[in-house]
Image: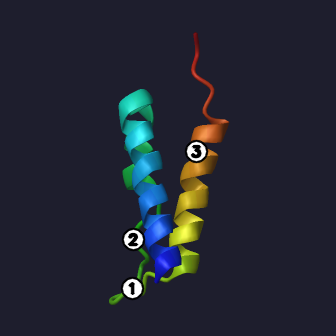
Amino acid sequence: MLLEKNTTANILEITMTIKEHHPELSKYLNEMGITLPDVANPVMTHKVLQEYYNSLQALLNTYKPNP
């Protein structure tokens, strides 16, 4: 349970960073399929949360703004 809380806090932090410092990336947040698993009753395990966090990190790390 503690892992899920920490990962959720990390997701919130990186999401806020994207929205505040790179608003042009916000459109990709809704397009990320991992956000909402495509099942009737999704189970949000630590693994699912961690994969989502990793995808957010990858989005930020691969983004190179044009000066």
Which residue is more in the foreground, 9 or 15?
Answer: 9
Numbered label attached to residue 36 = 2
Residue at point 63% right, 26% down? Answer: 64
Q: Residue furthest left?
A: 40
- Nearer the N terminus, badge 3 or badge 2? 2
Tell me: residue 55, above or below residue 45. Answer: above
Using the rendered image of the protein, determine whether residue 47 is visible from the camera's viewpoint: yes
Q: Left or right of 45: which side holds 42? A: left
- Nearer the N terminus, badge 2 or badge 1? 2
Residue 35 picture location, percent across and down: 43, 65
Residue at point 63% right, 48% down? Answer: 58
Kindly state the secondary structure of the residue where label 2 is placed: loop
Numbered label attached to residue 59 = 3
Looking at the rendered image, the quarter that the C terminus falls into is: top right
Q: Amino acid at mark 1?
A: Pro
Numbered label attached to residue 42 = 1
Residue 63 found in image quarter: top right
Pointer 2 with pointer 1, Cβ within 8 A: yes
Tell me: residue 18, above or below residue 38. Answer: above
Spatial separation of the CA atoms under disc 1 and disc 3: 23 Å
Residue at point 50% right, 71% down? Answer: 49
